[in-house]
Every structure is written in structure tokens, then in C-alpha cells.
Image (cartoon, rainbow, N blue to C red):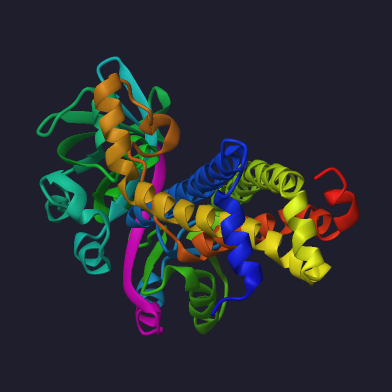
Amino acid sequence: MMPWEWLVGVRQLGATRRAGFPSFVAAISVIGLTLGVAVLVVVLSVMNGFERELRTRMLTVTSHATLMGLEGALPDWRTAASIAQRTPGVTGVSPYVESQAMFANGNRVVGASLRGIDARAEARAGGLGVRVQGAAFDALQRGRWRVVLGAALARELGVGIGESVVLILPEGSATPEGVVPRMRRLTVIGTFESGMYEYDRGLAFTGIEDAARLQNLGDAVTGVRLTLADPLRAPAIVREVALALGGGYYVSDWTRNHANFFRSIELTKSLLFVILSLIVGVAAFNIVSTLVMVVKEKSSDIALLRTLGATPGGILRAFAVQGVLIGLAGTIAGALLGVLIATQVEALVHGLETVLGVRFLDAKVYFMSDLPAAVDWRDVARVCGVAFATCALATLYPAWRAAGTQPAEALRHD
């Protein structure tokens, strides 16, 4: 058996004498709340997916953590690599040589980073090797002067696999004619596509011995890259490695290098949550107007309940039930709709792009061409909690008005 307040509250949602107008407004309130919750869930899921995909793609190219010498080169890198490899949480260590350079092909000149890598160490560390088209990193052999370009960089230079580009380094070489930039012709043996335009347009790989020779480093390297089992522990692990080596090293990690970027994503996510919550607020105002109309229309019924012994608290609970049911229905429906759309948003966007013939996401601007979404159930719970709490608060005023109805005044003209 249900309390009479619940029975009356449920009946009041559908029983009206004026062509069902309050019930129609209640349905609109449910629809508005459903759309508000669904939009919040979809937007937060897209932001989560964007952050996760960006982090995944970024970590296939950039280092989880790096250990470098304070003077710009790391001569004893083998000792550092050995100690780092024995550190718990480190799954791979690879030396590298990196510098800024210019690539030229005919009249086309493009600036990019040149990274010299050890193919075998890079394969053990994992990462970008699986995204290379053409020859693998193993073909970057010493003295062969080969290079693997980012796909966007190769397109901008207008070169393909098997063709050559001219590498121009900022370090000068002394000649009888004066100091001239150091240049070398490299053969393009492959391209890679990480999915992030920033790297596909601004990064090239060559053999570590050739890169060190170009910069006159001898047996030294720029630093060592650490691949970690848990990238989120990068700051603590790289500091532990540096302390185990006795200090005197410059350490960095991906959370520090890209801190502002991910902080801006979190800030945008919070702002969108606040702004889009206004849709839920509009739905809550609809609930207020719905219940106020119901209270006005049912004033005589409320008076009869009071004469039959109903207390003001019982009347308040009966009308609060209506707002709670509207909020519960809209919140559940919105959460289900939002999760459904979020899981299919990528296919929906591609479908709209095909139908409309436009490109919504330009990789040059948004870093990626897809719109991934990742449903975080904590976000879903937070959205549902805020929506339901807002609707519950919206019922207080009309329920309080209903509880304050005076039977004599309400029945005077009936």
C-alpha cells in the first residue's frame, strides 16, 4: 500500500478539468529536462573523449618523461639509461638526439624538429613505429642518411617515399666563403601519421648516429626518453631516476610540457557544465509554473482534502511528489538519451559531414579530424544529481502554496 500523498500526487499529474493543459505543460517540462540532461552528458562525454584521444595520440609521439644534461648534451647516457631501466614503473628507455631544422625541396622550405632515434630501443619502448608507412624505423641505418617525415610535412614539401629532401641545420660550418648553414641531403623512406597535425607537420625521424654526427655530438645524445607503465606517475618516476643518478640532470615530463593545454580542457569542461546547466534551470522553472497552475486549478480539491483531515504537511508532500516525479522522469530519460547519443556521436558527425558536404573538424585547427566521446559515469551521476536536486528544489514554492490553502476561502464560491 502506498501513502495517500503519493497516490494523490500521481493522479494530479493527469487529472485536470481544463483540457489537460497542466498535464501538457508537465510533459513539456519533462521534455525540456530530458534535453538539458542529454546535452550535458553528450558535451561532457565529447570533452572527455577529446582529452583521452589527445593524450593517447600525444603520448605515442612525445615522451612520457625525459632526462637531459644541463649543458645541452648527455655524454654518460648509457649509465642513466641502465639505472632508469631498473626503476620500477619504467617499461622502456631510448636515447635520442633532437634539434630544430629546415627541410627544403625546390622552392618549398618548411621548419620542423629532427629527432634521431635508436630503432631497436624505440621498438622496445613502443609508440609511433606502428603508424609508419613505407620502410620501418629499422631502415634508419648509420651512414645511409635516411629520414621518415610526418605525413603533413611530406605533403607540404611535395615529396614522396623514395625522393630526397635537403636538411638545413642552424649550426654553421666554417668555409673559405664564411660561415654557412650545415646541410645534408636525406632520402625519404617513409611517412608517419600520428593523428595530430602538430606532430605530423612538425616532426621528422632519422638515425641517432646520423643526427649526432650532424650536430657534432660524438657519442653523446640530447637525452633519454622514458616510457612508463602509468604515464600519470611521470613526474614522480623521472624525479626518482634523477635522484638515483645523483642529480645534475634536467628532467621533464608530458604533464609539465602540456600542462596549460590539459588545464584549459578542464576549465572549458567546467564552464560548459555551468552554462549548459541553465537548460536544466529553464526546465525547473517550467516545473514551477506547472505546479502553480495545478495548485490554482485544484484549490477546491485541496480544500476538500483539508476538511477530510489532511494536514498542511501532507498537502505539501502530495504536490512535492509531482515535481519529484517530473524531475525523476526527465533525469532518467535524459541520461539514457545522452549516453546513447554519446556512444554514436562519431558516426553521427561523419554522417552529417557526408550529407552536408562540409568538414566540421579541421585537423589543422582542432588537432584531430574525428569527434571521439568517452562516457564517464561519474559525470553522468553528477549531471543527474544536479538536475534532480534542481527539480526537487523547484517544487518547494508551489507545494508550500498548496499547503497554505485555506479551506473556507477555497470553497466560498463553490
User: In the displayed image of the protein, which residue is found farthest to the top?
Assistant: 107
Please indicate whether residue 232 sits to the left or right of residue 201 in the image. Answer: right
Residue 392 spot, x, y in % from top left: 68, 60
Does 23 lie within the magenta span? no
The magenta segment is 82-101
Q: Total marks drawn? A: 0
Please say whether residue 21 is visible from this viewpoint. yes
Q: Residue at x 24, y 25 (%)?
A: 354
Q: Which of 322 and 115 is in front in this view?
A: 322
- The quarter of the image holding the N terminus is bottom right
Q: Which residue is drawn at 31% across and 46% down?
A: 344
Q: Which of 143 and 20 is in front in this view?
A: 20
Does 95 lie within the magenta span? yes
Q: Residue at x 36, y 39 (%)?
A: 368
When asked about the image quadrant of residue 219, the answer is bottom left
When asked about the image quadrant of residue 217, the answer is bottom left
Please say whether residue 184 is visible from this viewpoint. no
Q: For the stretch drawn in magenta, what is the main secondary structure?
A: strand
